[in-house]
Image (tube, rainbow, N blue to C red):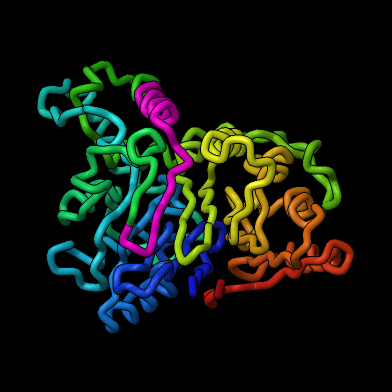
Amino acid sequence: MIQIKMFPAKNGDSFLIKAGDLPNSYLLIDGGFNDTYSKYIKPELENLASKSKSLGLVVVSHIDEDHIKGIIKLIEENGSNLDSCIIKIENIWHNSLRSITTYTSNLENLSLVDREIIKDLTTLDYPTSDDDGDISGKQGSSLAKLLAENDYIWNFKQGYEPISKDSVSTYSLNNEIDIQILAPNNEILNLLKTKWERELRYKGFTGNISNSVFDDGFEFLLARDQTIIDTELISDIQNLEKAYTPDNSITNRASISFILKAKDKRILFLGDSWAEDIEKSLKDIFKDEKKITFDVIKISHHGSRSNTSVSLLELIDAPVYLISTNGQKHGHPDMPVLLEIVKRETSVKRRIYFSETNIKIEDLKKFEDKFNFEVLNASNNWINL
């Protein structure tokens, strides 16, 4: 049996997957905020460790704070990978600056002005919001810095290789679990690098960018990248084809998205990916299949109308959908996305699981009988497949 737990992560993502029977057949996908970790993730991992279990893989889909901050807190408290305080972690996937470039550290050769620019960036920390509990007074570190300092196996080595469709494609965690990467590809990661370089120049940096590794500044600055969408109000029953506004955030586009295969099940995890990239990748893999079915689909970007298109939903389906958000910050998920999912013809009764209480649960329940689905609050409970 495969089990999935959606941790309450407010407007973020965090999932724990039990995908097999081996001690390392556990995956943690994203970590939400600090209090997601302290209230939910930490107790669960301590329980697993007490049973001699380990995390075979931790996936950080991308660097936005609502996905990464709980993982940072985990690594801070877990300490050295050689002597883990919470749980043994065998591998971490995380694309930071050193993963997507061939830069080498050369800070001492920069001009005083350039060094001050980098210093300002590395002391930014992640944007602090009302969604992030348990704020400590000390300066935060980027995840990249913590992984390097604590000797974690990161992107299979020391973080200098990218996790991308072009470089990894498929990966076997053990003889129970296979993963197929859908996004990003190297072209998308290069766009992320270009955005970083452009931001540095905008701030007045004049030195040789290719001779400098600044993981902290990279993560802190690009975590501020936001989707800019049409502010036109959408109605609860509006057609998704009209409501859809494509995402334009490069950090979202760089999300690690993949198919998890275990025990004859296929689970589609989409991070905050762009619909167009996922659709192309799936068509490349599945060729002429008109409808690609999964056992579970984790909807991209908390059900935003900018990341799930009509054409993508025409291509994919599943009996179970996962949506992670409380809806209090951005109003996610958008009802046109939810209605497009449930109104399609199906021979099974779909189940739509939310990570925690959300006003859209009651809004969606009004359509249960009409479209043959069930909407549930799975807050911190196991979903059995």
96 or 268, nearer to the observer? 268
Q: Could you tell me residue 104's position as x and y percent?
A: 16, 29
Horizontal side of residue 324 vs 26, given as left or right: right
Residue 188 in magenta stretch: yes
Residue 179, image x and y in percent?
41, 52
Q: Is residue 153 magenta?
A: no
Quarter of the image holding residue 234? Answer: top right
For the C terminus, the image quarter is: bottom right
At which x and y percent is residue 156? 24, 48
Q: Residue at x 64, y 67 (%)?
A: 353
x and y, in percent, of residue 259 in the image? 49, 51
338 horizontally vs 107: left or right: right
Which segment did they paint magenta? 173-199
Q: Nearer the viewer, residue 13 or 50?
A: 50
Q: Is residue 134 visible?
A: yes
- The front one of 184 and 350 is 350
Looking at the image, residue 163 lies above or below residue 60: above
Q: Determine the residue located farthest toward the left in the rendered image.
A: 108
Q: Is residue 342 left or right of residue 47?
A: right
Q: Nearer the viewer, residue 290 or 275?
A: 290
Which quarter of the picture shows residue 365? Answer: bottom right
Residue at 72% over, 43% down? 314
Residue 120 in sight: no
- Say above or below: 189 vs 353: above
Residue at (56% x, 57% y) in the render: 11
